[in-house]
Image (cartoon, rainbow, N blue to C red):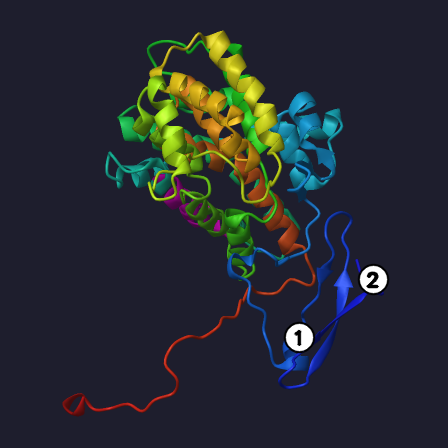
Amino acid sequence: MSTNRTANLSDSTSGKSSELPVLQGTLGAPVIDIGRLYKDTGCFTFDPGFVSTASCRSAITYIDGDEGVLLYRGYPIEQLAKHSSFLEVSYLLLNGDLPNQKQFDDFSHEVTHHTMMHEALKSFLNGFRHDAHPMAMLCGVVGSMAAFYHEQLDMDDAEHRRLAAIRLLAKVPTIAAACYRYSIGWPIRYPRNNLEYVSRFLHMMFEVPSEPLELPPVAAKALDLLFILHADHEQNASTSTVRLVGSTGANPYACVAAGIAALWGPAHGGANEAVLKMLEEIGTADQVGKAVEKAKDKTSGFRLMGFGHRVYKNFDPRATIIREMCHKVLDELGVHDPLLDVAMKLEEAALKDDYFVQRKLYPNVDFYSGIIYKALKIPTEMFTVMFAIARTAGWVAHWLEQQADPDGKIGRPRQIYTGAASREFVQMDKR
C-alpha cells in the first residue's frame, strides 16, 4: 500500500509545508495521504461531494470510470453476469472468493433458512398508512430488526457479524415483498424455500393463495441479472452512508436502514423510478423528438433521466449488459406498452443524436432496469426497493469489511465555516 513517493504541499502565506505520502492500491489512481496535513500546516482540505477523496481502504469493488471497468473482487462484471448467479455473487462479495460447490450449497442453505421474518413484523406493517411508499416501510422495518435480534449484536463477535449479514441478505426480499403486498391489501406470502433466491422473491411478490404463480423463465433470469449488476458499486452515496453509520459502532440493521434511506434519493437509487416518470411525461413515441430537443435546451428545465453517469465517463458496462437482456425480455414476453415504445424510441434517438453521442450521454443501467421492471409488471414505487434488495449484498460486504478493519475510525468530516464571527449576546429588550 505504501510507496516511497511523496507529495509536497506548501502554504504561500504562512510558509508552512507538509510532505505527504502517496499511496498506491492494486488498481486505480494513487492517493495522497493527508492525515498529517492539519498538524503540519493548520489547513484542512475542501472537497464537496467527496469527488476527489478516498474515504477508506476496500478490497471489494473497483471501478475505472474512464475505461468502463467494473470488478467485483477482481472479477469483471461481464464474466459474472454471464456465468454466475446473484447468490453466488453475494458469497463472493461477502467472503472475497468464489465458492466451491460445497461452500455454495452451505451458503445457499443458510440464506434460504433465514428467509422468514418475525410474525410480529406484521403488526408493525399495520401501523403504516395503506398508501405508504414501500421504501418508507422497508427503511422502518429493516431498522427494527435490531429489536428482534438484540441478543446477537456484539460487534466484536465475528460470528454475530456474519450471522447479521446472512439475516439481512435473506430477509430483505421477504420484507420488501411484504411491504408491497401490504400496500395493495394482499395477505403476506411466506417464502417458498424450495425455490432459488430470485424466484422465491417473485412468488412472495405476486403469488395469490387461490392459484399457483407461473413465471416465464426470462423473468427470474432478468431479475437475477439486474441484482448482480446492482449488487455493489464501490463508495456510492448509500454504501458510504452504511460505512459512516457503521463507523460509530451502530448495529448492522441500523446501518442498512440508513443505506436504504440514502438510496431512496432520486439522484441515487430513485433514478430508475424517475425514468418511468419521465417517460410518462413524454407520453407517446411520436413526442420523443420534441423531448430530445427540449433536453438540449438548458433553459427548458427538462432532463432526460437515465442517461450518462457521474463515474462512468465513456460507457456504463452494466448498461451494455442489461441492454441485451432488456430487449430479450420485451421480445419473449411480447409486451405491448406505450411507455415502453417511448423508451425504445428514446434509446434510438439518444444513441444516434450527435448532441448525446459527443457528450457521452448514453442510456445507463437505470434506464434499462426501469424498462425491465415495467415489463415484469413491477410497480414503479417498487423500483428502488428492487435496487435495495440487490445492494444489500454490497452493503453488508462493506459493513463486514469495515468492522474487521483494525485501523477503523469514526467518520468525522470537517467544514468551511461561513457563519457569523464571534459576537456578544444582547438582551431581548435591547435588540
Looking at the rendered structure, which numbered label has been put on residue 86? none
In the rendered structure, the answer to whether residue 249 lies left or right of residue 104 reads: left
**Sequence-wise first label, 1 or 2:** 2
Q: Main secondary structure of the magenta part?
A: helix
Give the quadrant of residue 67.
top right
* Secondary structure category for the residue under label 2: loop
Asked if residue 147 lies in the magenta stretch, the reply is yes
Give the amino acid type for the residue marked by disc 2 in the picture: Thr
Give residue 52's position: percent from left, percent from top.
Answer: 61, 57
Looking at this view, is 355 or 80 the one in front? 355
Give the amino acid type for the residue marked by disc 1 in the picture: Leu
**Residue shown at 65%/81% (left/top)?**
12
Residues shaded magenta: 137-150
Residue 332 in view of the camera: yes
Kindly report the distance in space between the C-alpha atoms of the residues bearing marks 1 and 2.
Answer: 18 Å
Instruction: Check the image and report above or below for 335 versus 396.
Output: above
Counting other residues with Cα less than 10 Å from the Cα at mark 2, is it few (<14), some (14-19), or many (20 or more)?
few
**Residue shown at 39%/35% (left/top)?**
295
Looking at the rendered structure, which numbered label has been put on residue 37? 1
Looking at this view, is 32 or 190 the one in front? 32
